[in-house]
Amino acid sequence: MEETEHKAVAFDVFQEVSKNWTGLRRYLFRVHIMVLTSAHFTLDVIRFAAALLEADGTGRWRARWQVARFLFGEPGIFRKLGSRYRDWYRPAFHPWDHDNRMKLEQWRQQFG
């Protein structure tokens, strides 16, 4: 809940800090950082999740293959992100374009 409530803070700070940049420069920088972050995050998830499988006796490459399959094949957690992830690459994107305040309210009622 906490992360969802504040999902746009860093984005808005970036918008403010870069307000004197051209729209193209701001967009290209944002896309560049998203590509780098996505690559590093994906590789880290695969590496660290595979390390847990390896600790349980699964071979190194088999463990990595199983994690990659889980993320991109079945059930395909990353694959299911699809359009929501691609939206970050739209020039006029803002995190609150995915308005999930109703979900936040459901969580508050359930856990609050």
Image: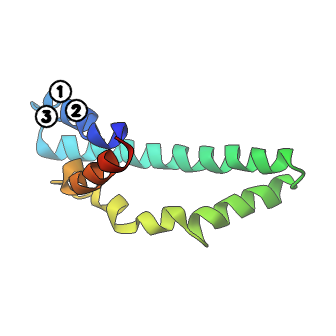
Residue at image location 50% in from the left, 61% down from the top: 78
Q: Residue furthest bottom?
A: 74
Q: Are marks 2 and 3 in contact (CB under 8 Å)?
A: no
Give the residue at x 24% y 49%: 95
Q: Earlier in the sequence, mark 2 or mark 3?
A: 2
Residue 7 located left or right of residue 17: right
Of badges 2 and 3, the one in the foreground is: 2
Q: Secondary structure at mark 1?
A: helix
Q: Position of residue 72 (x, y in %)?
A: 57, 67
Q: CA distance from mark 1 to mark 2?
A: 5 Å
Assess disc 1: are there few (<14), some (14-19) or many (≥20) residues with their C-alpha within 10 Å of its C-alpha.
few
Percent coordinates x, y for residue 26 in the rendering: 20, 41
User: What's the amino acid at mark 3?
Assistant: Trp
Q: Which residue is mark 3?
A: 21
Label 3, label 1: how far apart the Cα atoms are: 9 Å
Q: Residue at x 30, y 48 (%)?
A: 109
**Looking at the picture, how far across and down is residue 29, in whole percent?**
28, 41
Local SS, label 3? loop
Q: Is residue 40 left or right of residue 27?
A: right
Q: CA distance from mark 2 to mark 3?
A: 11 Å
Which callout, 3 or 1, points to the residue nearer the camera?
Answer: 1
Image x and y of residue 73, in percent: 60, 72
Residue 94 visible in the current orientation: no
Q: Are marks 1 and 2 in contact (CB under 8 Å)?
A: yes
Query: What residue type is disc 1 on?
Result: Val
Q: Quadrant of the C terminus?
A: top left
Instruction: Residue 37: tell me if it is visible.
Output: yes
**Dot label at residue 14:** 2
Q: Residues within 10 Å of mark 3 (few under 14, many from 20)?
A: few
- In this view, 76 is above or below 14: below
Residue placed at 13% from the left, 44% from the top?
Answer: 23
Q: Name the residue that disc number 1 marks.
A: 17
